[in-house]
Image (cartoon, grey):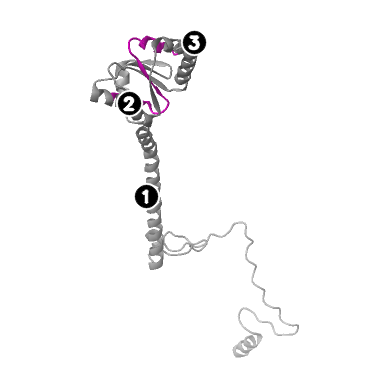
Amino acid sequence: MNRDQKAAAIAEIVDQIRESEAVFAVDFRGISVPQAADVRMRLRDADARFRIVKNTLTERAADEAGAEPLKALLVGPTALTFVRGDAALAAKALAAFNRETELLAFKGGLMNGEALDVEQLRTIARLPAREVLYGQLVGMVAAPITGLVRGLNALIAGLAVALEQVREKKESGEIPSGPAPEGASTRPPSAESADTPPQPETPDQDAEPPAAPPTTEQPAEGAPQTGAGGTDTDNEEQAGASA
């Protein structure tokens, strides 16, 4: 590999590191070409690329990409998995291949600029795939909203039932329909008020006294006068009798 080829290889690795969300390093010792092809096919679903690299070139690429933690993993035969998609799914694929063949043991990795050790990679491999996690998250977020909607529906249904019962009672006469007459009291008279006789009205002190009855008309001129004892004829008859 001449200088230009090395420079092109370094630039390509730099781009792959920068474009990846995670980089996993594995020991590719003992793997065959058909097995390597099988690994690449398994990693397609995770949008990951499996690449056997030269340690010296990868160290220079790590320096240019600012992936300093990656340099400590470049010891012995090393292959890198550049993950642009689902990191958990890619780790699952590598872990499954290792269980089946006892090849491609984890060496470490890098995710979002942070170094990953072997145990952390195994933990990532045990995580659900990204789509499964999204579904669980949506279910967790939707659960309170679903409960709220169900509660509101139950409240509205109960209100509708109550209004229907009121309407039926009005139609049957159990509840009088229409507003009460203005000024009418809705309270029944108490027994005490029913037994108490009506009280006479108290005269108003500021009211004017009643007018005096009209006086008796005076007798016309020349008419006989009446006294307390009777008429004048009666007096004359009493005088003749005594004579």
Q: Nearer the viewer, residue 148 or 198?
A: 148
The label number, if any, that marks residue 39 in the structure image: 2
Q: Which residue is mark 3?
A: 3
Tell me which label, 2 or 1, sits earlier in the chain: 2
Does dot 2 land on a helix, a strand or a loop? helix
**In the image, which residues are magenta?**
67-95
Task: Tell me residue 223's x, y (percent).
Answer: 72, 85
Q: Residues within 10 Å of mark 1 (few under 14, many from 20)?
A: few
If the image is split into quadrants, where does the N terminus sit?
top left
Amino acid at the residue labelled 3: Arg
Closer to viewer: mark 2 or mark 1: 2
Image point 41% across, 51% down: which residue? Answer: 156
Tell me which label, 2 or 3, sits earlier in the chain: 3
Q: Which residue is mark 1?
A: 154
Tell me which label, 1 or 3, sits earlier in the chain: 3
In the figure, 167 relative to 81: above or below? below
Q: Are marks 2 and 1 in contact (CB under 8 Å)?
A: no
If the image is split into quadrants, where does the C terminus sit?
bottom right
Task: Tell me residue 125's x, y (percent).
Answer: 31, 25
Closer to viewer: mark 1 or mark 3: 3
Image point 39% across, 60% down: which residue? Answer: 164
Q: Quadrant of residue 232?
A: bottom right
Q: Residue furthest front?
A: 2
Taking the magenta stretch, the answer to whether it contains residue 85 is yes
Closer to viewer: mark 2 or mark 3: 3
